[in-house]
Amino acid sequence: MVLFENVGVRYGGGPEIIQGATFTLAPGSFHFLVGPSGAGKSSLLRLMYLSLRPSIGRVNLFGRDIDGLHRRDVPLLRRRIGVVFQDFRLLVHLSALDNVALPLRIAGVRESEIRDHVTELLKWVGLADHVNAFPATLSGGQQQRVAIARAVIARPSLLLADEPTGNVDDSIGVRLMYLFEELNKMGTTVVIATHNERLVGRFNHRQLRVESGTVKLVAARPEAA
Amino acid sequence: MRWLRSDLPLAGDASGRFLPWIIGCMVYLAALALAGTMAADRLAQRWHNELAGTFSIQIPAGSPAATGDRAGLVDGVVDLLMNTSGVASARVVDDAEKARLLEPWLGPGGLPEGVRLPDLIVVQLTPGAPVVIKDLRARIAAVAPDATIEDHAQWQGDMLAFARSIKLLACIIIGLITAAAVTTVIFVTRTGLSIHRRVIEIVHLVGARDSYIARQFLMHALRLGLLAGLTLMGLDRVLAQAQTSLLPSLSLDANQWLALAMVPLAVSAVAMVTAHLTVLLVLGRGL
């Protein structure tokens, strides 16, 4: 699903902020991406959602090396990836419904199918009363849930989330984690970047630990007997 | 409906706010140029139709051949004409008609005493019959050496050259208008891409192709183009109520009016294609 081989990332002529990253994320796996601020978690995610190319090394997504990828092939790969951005990146001129519907419309899903599907998901993330609300009228937590709904609406093969529970209270955070686990059970590969140690402790999954530019894969704790 | 919806907030752009008016002016100028060329074409055709199939023969009053039996000479030319294949009629213009023709210059008193006018014969040809003027001129010269034939070729040539000049000028004007419209749409589209850079990036990140974004600009350009055309037509109708019009009073046939009505659509099509190609080009290079 995701393969990194000796991947290095540098911005401009600066130092390498990620060095020799080598790991594989198997289809259907669930990983937390953890590490201190500035360690390169967001850069790793950007590599995975094709917003950044490695300075060195090989990144392979869904069996395709991104290095030789043609511009016209990028959208098709991105449609298989759902991304929850730390700053939400909602379109402020569109309602919650239209923001969430965007990936479906882009993928060419029929309009008659979109509304029910989107409304149901917004209801699931606790925004049933805000279907037609614009982002500016929503709280940070509500915006984050719209962003999550947009990321998962098209049932992506790979879900990447950057601090998805950063702006919601614990009960909503746990509920969202259950949503991610549900998607994972249906076959979606999930990577969640987070600082929330309590969340990482509560949900026992493998970790990609980024420290001083290196990436280490840490296995999940063994289940208690 | 999918084609009509927009995920980019293009309608609120300040740069696009004046585009309908700019395109409206261009539609008006293009319609004016097209109407001009069609009117010139029609006028030239009418002149041609009125003059085609007729010519006149003039025998000067002082012609040595006419000093003797003047009437006999004219009759001889008429007989020759009537025996010529393709000639439908040959009519001698009498003195009263000549005086009437000269009335605007000489007044109603008729010709001054002693003034002699040339003899005129008006010849009508059978429609479609081939008559070689050059051969006829030689045969008439054998009967009346000083006679001249006026087949309007020179005048018609000048008129056609004039009509062609008008058409060429109109084509140049339409070309310049198209170039100006294309340049304006490119500028507005590039500005739109720049303004909505962040939104376009997000739409790209959720899987949109460049063509999806280009289609939104294309539909925006279509809306603006049609709005401009409809505004112009509406304004023309309002002015028509006030006994005037944006377009001059023209005698055009149904096809030509249809061609004029197509101008806003043609300008909209140019705007659409330009916007679409501009977006693909800019995004392809990297926004």
Image (cartoon, helix red, strand yellow):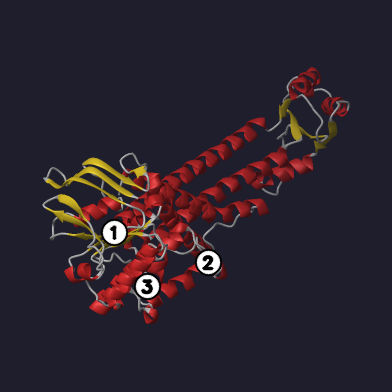
Closest to the camera, between mark 3 and mark 1, is 3
Marked residue chain, label 1: B
In the rendered image, which residue does mark 2 sit on? B234
For marks 3 and 1, give the CA distance.
18 Å
Mark 1 Cα-neighbour bin, 10 Å: few <14, some 14–19, many ≥20: few
Q: Are marks 3 and 2 in contact (CB under 8 Å)?
A: no
Q: Is residue B88 above or below residue B63?
A: below
What is the three-letter code of the residue carrying label 3? Ala
Which residue is located at x 31 percent, y 66 percent?
A90
Helix, strand or loop at disc 2?
helix
Closest to the camera, between mark 3 and mark 2, is 3
Residue A105 sits in quarter: bottom left
What is the three-letter code of the residue carrying label 2? Gly
Find residue B42 and report its horizontal and vertical position in percent. 64, 46
Find residue B275 and report its horizontal and vertical position in percent. 42, 51
In the rendered image, which residue does mark 3 sit on? A96
Mark 3 Cα-neighbour bin, 10 Å: few <14, some 14–19, many ≥20: many
Mark 2 Cα-neighbour bin, 10 Å: few <14, some 14–19, many ≥20: few
Instruction: Work out whether residue A134 or residue B142 is closer to the camera in this orientation and state it.
Output: A134
Q: Are marks 3 and 1 in contact (CB under 8 Å)?
A: no
In the rendered image, which residue does mark 1 sit on? B198
